[in-house]
Amino acid sequence: MKHLSASFILLAVLCGCRQTANQPLLCQVLARPSDYAGQKLTLSGIAQMYQHESTLKSRECPDHVLALDMLPHPVQQPLDHLPDAQFFTKLATRPHASVSVTGQIVHAVDQPHPYVFRVESGNYK
């Protein structure tokens, strides 16, 4: 019995080491972004790139949008191989793309939106 208990504890510790993304509905996040700030999230919605910003919205709550942002990268680092940079490069050529993005909500500084979603990676559906 001790062996079984030790195995269970080891399994629980190993599983706890990996951070997985929470997957709330986009409208829930848009209604209360401060509740999700700092959490790793995966959100699905319609992404759109405009001249000065990119946004994510949902058909269920189309009057609300979440601004999308890239992770901060060192200036000398080439961006073409980074998952978030690849996502935004494709977004420029795909208007109203159905996407799933993983990242974190962060408080925006000097931006028109109080919170932005900092994209770590994204997939097109």
Image (cartoon, rainbow, N blue to C red):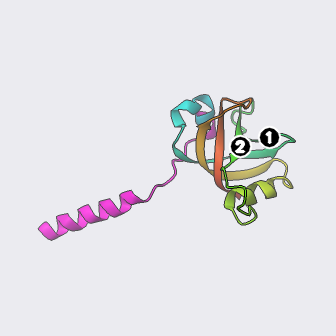
Between residue 48 and residue 109, name the one nearer to us. Answer: 109
Magenta residue span: 1-28
Looking at the image, tell me whether mark 1 or mark 2 is earlier in sequence order: 1
Q: Is residue 45 left or right of residue 96?
A: left
Judging by the rendered image, the residue that carries numbered circle 2 is 68
Between residue 53 and residue 43, name the one nearer to us. Answer: 53
Secondary structure at numbered mark 2: strand
Tell me which residue sits at (76%, 46%) in the image: 47
Report which quarter residue 29 is drawn in: top right
Judging by the rendered image, the residue that carries numbered circle 1 is 53
Residue 76 percent coordinates (x, y): 72, 60
The answer to whether residue 1 shows anywhere in this view is no
The answer to whether residue 116 shows anywhere in this view is yes
Tell me which residue sits at (63%, 33%) in the image: 30
Callout 1, which amino acid? Answer: Glu
Tell me which residue sits at (76%, 64%) in the image: 80
Callout 2, which amino acid? Answer: Leu
